[in-house]
Amino acid sequence: MEFSELIARRYSVRAYKPDPVEEDKLQRVLEAARLAPTACNRQPFQFIIIQTAGREAELRRIYHRSWFSQAPLLICACGLRELAWSRKDGQNYVYVDTTIAMDHLILAATNLGLGTCWVAAFDVEAAREVLGLPNNVEPVAFTPLGYPADQLKSKDRKPVADLMRHEGW
Ligand SMILES: Cc1cc2nc3c(=O)[nH]c(=O)nc-3n(C[C@H](O)[C@H](O)[C@H](O)COP(=O)(O)O)c2cc1C
């Protein structure tokens, strides 16, 4: 897909078909995440690939919407804070690095006809429990990964003029 078309085509998919995600497509989206840039090239993240079949009720504890566990796969992007680069003032970039990698994954998925939806409003404690995450592993965001069963609606966005400015406030 042409890049600007890809950007326009990605949307938050909130209904999924049960069709499995082919292993080579999964590997391709993970490869896109792997190639993402990270501060100081620290790569301070891990992606957990979760098979949803039979675990729907348990996974719904993490995020209560029914579509969350409707796709065959769920991916949890986790940050490893102690591996991430920190700026001189102490600002740690683990969320930035993990988010960029997740966005690579999401755009690669769109390019392969797969649907995704960023989910940040999950229950962190439930995620820790269900996935057995150690304390040093921070769940940053989830996305289902599967074939869309809904369609792109129109994009509700502010005009560019509201989002950009030339120097000077
Ligand atoms: C960091 C982040 C967190 C989000 N968390 C949620 C979420 O918890 N639940 C949800 O349904 N959508 C979530 N979204 C999706 C947004 O609502 C969605 O991207 C936005 O409304 C624009 O719609 P679009 O993705 O279809 O273009 C999140 C998006 C981002 C970028």
Image: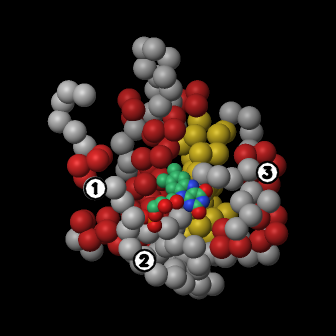
Residue at 58% across, 40% down: 79
The picture quadrant where one finds residue 19 is bottom right
The residue identified by callout 3 is 126
Comes first in the chain, label 3 or label 1 = 3
Which residue is under mark 2?
152
Picture quadrant of residue 142? bottom right
Camera-nearest label, 3 or 1: 1
The Cα atoms of the two marked residues, 3 and 2, are separated by 30 Å
Quadrant showing the N terminus = bottom left
Left/right placement of residue 129 relative to residue 36 reads right
At mark 1, the secondary structure is loop
**Ligand 1 within 8 Å of the CB at mark 1:** no
Question: Label 2 is placed on what type of residue?
Answer: Leu
Sequence-earlier tag: 2 or 1 = 2
Residue pictured at 79% horizontal, 54% vertical: 130
Is 131 placed above or below 14 here? above
Q: Mark 1, residues whose alpha carbon is within 10 Å: few (<14), some, or many (≥20)? A: few
Query: Around disc 3, counting alpha carbons within 10 Å, would you say few (fewer than 14), some (14 to 19), or many (20 or more)?
Result: some
18 sits left or right of 33 in the view: right
Q: Amino acid at mark 1?
A: Pro
The disc, 3 or 2, on the residue closer to the chain's N-terminal end is 3
Q: Say how the picture is coloured.
A: secondary structure
- Mark 3 to mark 1 CA distance (whole Å): 38 Å
Q: Secondary structure at mark 3?
A: helix
Secondary element at tag 2: loop
Residue under numbered circle 1: 159
CB within 8 Å, label 3 to label 1 = no
Q: CA distance from mark 2 to mark 1?
A: 19 Å
Give coordinates of residue 169: x percent, y percent.
25, 28
In percent of the image, x 43 and y 20: which residue is there?
A: 87
